[in-house]
Each structure stands twice: as structure tokens, then as C-alpha cells.
Image: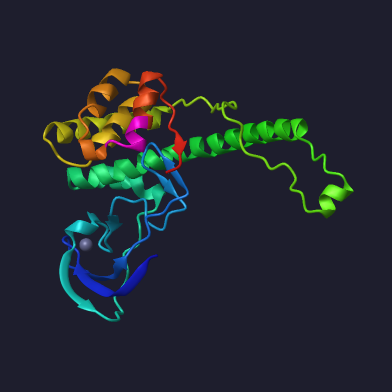
Amino acid sequence: MTIIRGFRIVASPCCGAQYSFPRYVSMNFMAFEYWTDGWRDGSLMPNDEGLRRCKCGQYILVRDMVAIDTADSSELPYMDHVPDELLPECIAKATSREVEVAARLGYWRYLNHPYRDRYRQHRDAEEAVTKAAWEAANPDRRNWWGKLRGRQAPSYSRPPGSPFTYPAFEASEEQLQNMQSLSEILREWVAASRQGYTMELAELYREQARFDESLQVIQTLDEQEVGVTSNLIMRLINERQSALMRYMM
Ligand SMILES: [Zn+2]
């Protein structure tokens, strides 16, 4: 459950404009869908990298805001998320590598959205065929007496080994350019032992079909980062598959 208690008053580092931020006492991390590029669907946690636009026009990161005070209530404005359409402008105007990386990570996931839609439609259609075949093979054979006595109709569960296919993933020129620039910066950061970008870098290489580089990077993951996501990415590297993938936790 997400609980908010009061506000933090903060000032932006660019021009000193003041804003209020809700103080989260606890936050819900649940999501219905996870994707290998780090996108989460159905989550109350925002997917953004803390990128905001100050009223003076400068793009800044939430973590760079200067703490002023806390308050029970506040008339100060919130800082809205940067709309996806503004991300190219933000990349062009970025005043630091950190802002550029946050914007490019957002743009990467945003440009992957059309594929997510195609993937969902494809998977839904294939699962519907699987289910229809199962229902044809498992008809409800209860007679009136069986129904009266409350016998259960056969209930569907996905047969193991059912077909699992997904649409081909072909990154556009725009996607490739962004992924290339982003992976160049992250390669330097990971080489400098900067925490928290290894999985993203491995996935970026994979989506560019640079499987050897992807494999090298994912093998450097810390032990506590190895899990469902990294195992899936590793499997896809070995299959030389560049499509982003949906999974459940
Ligand atoms: Zn400002």
C-alpha cells in the first residue's frame, strides 16, 4: 500500500524555484507485468528515472533538489513528470550526463511501447487458440444429474509446452541511435564500477543484437542482482534473440 504523510519542501538547483513533494511513508512495488527493458505495468511506482522540468525550462533530477523543510500541507506546486514527447528535447538540452542518461532510458522504454502492444495482441491471440483447442478436447460431459449434484465442469489450465511465440523485434533507426548513445555512456559507467546500470547495459546490447557484448556485461552482475530478470536475459542472449520480453514475478 502507498501511504503519503505530509510534504517535503525543496528548491531546484537551477533557479531556486520551490516545489513540494509528497512524503511517501511506504510505497507499493507490485506490478502486473515486467519487461526486460525495466518497464513495469500496473505498478503504482513511477517508471521514470526522477527526471523533472523546472518552470525555468531546465531539466533536472529529483535527487538533485535541495531540501528546505517539511510541512503538513503546502500551496507550492508539484513537479510533474516529463511527458515522453519532450524527451528528445531533454536529451538535446541535457546539462549533465546524468540527465541525459535518465532521458535516454525513458526514451528507450517509450520507443519500445509499440512493440509491447504488438506482443500483447500476439500473445493473447495465441493463448486464445490454445484455450479453444483445449476446450474442444475437454467438453463439458456432465449430464443433468451430475450438474444437479454439483459436479464441477472441467476447468482450463494452460497445457505445459503450448506454443509460445512473439512478433519479430526490429528496432527502428531512431531506436538504434538512442540505444547506441545510451550504451556508450553506460559502458563507461559500468567500467567505472558505477552501481545499478549493468542489467540495463546488457539488455541494451541484446536489443541491438550485440550478443557477445551483452553476454560479457551480464556475467559481471553482482550475485544479489542475479535472479528472474537476469536469468531470462541470459537465456535470450544464448538464443540470440533481440526481442524485449514480458514476464511475471
Ligand atoms: Zn529552474
Quadrant of the frame with the C terminus: top left
Quarter of the image where one finds residue 79 = bottom left
Residue 246 in percent (x, y) is at: 46, 37
Q: Which residues are magenta?
A: 226-231
Residue 230 among those drawn in magenta: yes
From this view, report whether residue 97 is shown above or below residue 31.
above
Residue at 47%, 53% (x, y): give it.
42
From this view, report whether residue 134 is shown above or below residue 75.
above
Q: Residue furthest left?
A: 192
Ligand 1 occupies quarter: bottom left
Give whichever of 187, 27 is nearer the camera. 27
Residue 244 in percent (x, y) is at: 43, 32
Residue at 18%, 48% (x, y): give it.
95
Instruction: Look at the magenta stretch and give its main secondary structure.
Output: helix
Quarter of the image where one finds residue 186 = top left
Colouring method of the image: rainbow
Quarter of the image where one finds residue 138 = top right
Residue at 17%, 34% (x, y): give it.
190
Residue at 37%, 27% (x, y): give it.
207
**Residue 208 in view, yes or no:** no
